[in-house]
Image (cartoon, helix red, strand yellow):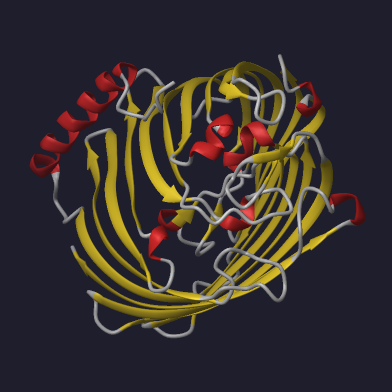
Amino acid sequence: MPHRTLAFRPAALPLAAALACMVMAAPAAAQLRPYFLSATQAFTHDSNLFRDREGAERSDRISSTGLRVGVDQPIGRQRLLAYAGVRRNKFDEFSQLDNTEYDVNLRGDLSTVNRLSGSVWYTNSRSLVSFGSYTGTTVVRERNLQTLEDFGLKARLGGDARWVLEGGWSHRDQDYSSEAFRSREQTSDTVSLGVRYQPSDLLSLGVAGRATEGRTPEYRTTAGGEPVKDKIRRRDLDFTAVWVPTGLSTLSARLSLTSTDHSLAQQRDFDGVTGALTWAYRPTGKLGLRVELIRETNDQSQLAWLPDTLNDPANLTLTPFEDTRLLTTLKVGATWDATAKLRVKGNARYTHRNIKDAVVRDEAGRPVLASASGTDRTTALGFGVDYAITRAWLVGCNLGWEKRRVSDDGSQVSFPYEARTATCLAQLTLQ
């Protein structure tokens, strides 16, 4: 069967066309300068590029050259956010990993006079999969690019009223360039409907039902077996809350009763509690703190964004978690504007993976074991400094440390490693 690739789907064309019209209309409504163009050059040293075991580490230096363009434009009662970026990564020693990453993001926030509002979005991105996200006891060193497409819409009826009706639909596709990871490709559609109660500007409570139908087109029930389709059926009952105890602090929470059924990969079925908790605190205008706790299944692991900089939403890197039945992540990030030009950043992340039915591969990526389970834990720390030379020029350096530990029951599905990274960059932004 020929390898399929992702493209702009017909279902997304009306959305893309509408947003394109908004882009062309933006200059007429612009009063400020909502557009930006930035170029970035970064150099990174990675002490353990493939996340190998101790004693087998292989280091490398990576050059990353990026270009990004975007617009953030109010248009009457509407708002358009659109940006696109491309980045070329060159590896000094392991040139077989050289790749070009890209991302396209379109979002339109819509509002009418009848308390009806909503948003539509489209994203498409390609990036090199982190070697630390793989499962198995043997490191896979081939280049593996993940392409992720996501689009959908949300609607809200009620505006600032006490009771609000909310609904939405989204479509998601993930694809891999490596033949060895065809069985990880997935397509899913999600619909949701719920109500929200807003007794004041400081408190919002919601309940919603969410249904997801997904497919893994080329799942293999045995190592080396013929690919078959695994159908995924997920149902969630979501309880959400947003509380603003003070003007300096915001607490957001989601608690979900989750049930996931697989037609073939039944060992990954799940019935239990998932959710997320976020606390944002800004005690002063110069200091900010953000804490996130996420508990999710493999089918929704895209919710566990692992940012390069926790306080920069435009700089998020998605890491898929292969064969992970349940994932728990705790993230802490802080920024301090020491001066008008100097920003200091720090972050920490702890991830616990419950791995179920991992397909362990040999050096060539061939499956050699079709059923194993266990757990591992990964801790990562980061520290960085940015200096704004002028309004347009920015330079910065970041240090990172990552360590994974494996429990006794995880010896067949994971292995320990340690890695250190150092990155320095220069960025020019025209606006």
Q: Is residue 352 above or below residue 372?
A: below
To which quarter of the image does residue 377 belong? bottom right
In the image, taking residue 400 as reference, residue 236 lies left or right, namely: right
Residue 167: % across, % down: 52, 19
Q: Is residue 158 in view?
A: no
Q: Quadrant of the N terminus?
A: top left
Of residue 279 and residue 57, the one placed in the foreground of this image is 57
Residue 428: % across, % down: 23, 72
In the image, taking residue 349 as reference, residue 273 lies left or right, namely: right
Q: Give the residue drawn at x 55%, y 68%.
A: 49
Of residue 431 and residue 161, the one placed in the foreground of this image is 431
Q: Give the residue drawn at x 58%, y 25%.
A: 162
Residue 168: % across, % down: 50, 21
Q: Is residue 250 above or below residue 396?
A: above
Q: Is residue 271 in view?
A: yes
Q: Give the residue drawn at x 66%, y 48%.
A: 362
Q: Residue furthest right?
A: 408
To which quarter of the image does residue 273 belong? top right
In the image, taking residue 273 as reference, residue 163 lies left or right, namely: left
Q: Is residue 288 above or below residue 271?
A: below
Residue 67: % across, % down: 24, 60
Q: Residue furthest left?
A: 28
Of residue 377 and residue 414, the one placed in the foreground of this image is 414
Q: Give the residue drawn at x 17%, y 37%.
A: 23
Of residue 34 and residue 216, the one placed in the foreground of this image is 216
Q: Quadrant of the C terminus?
A: bottom left
**How many numbered dots are placed on residues in this image?**
0
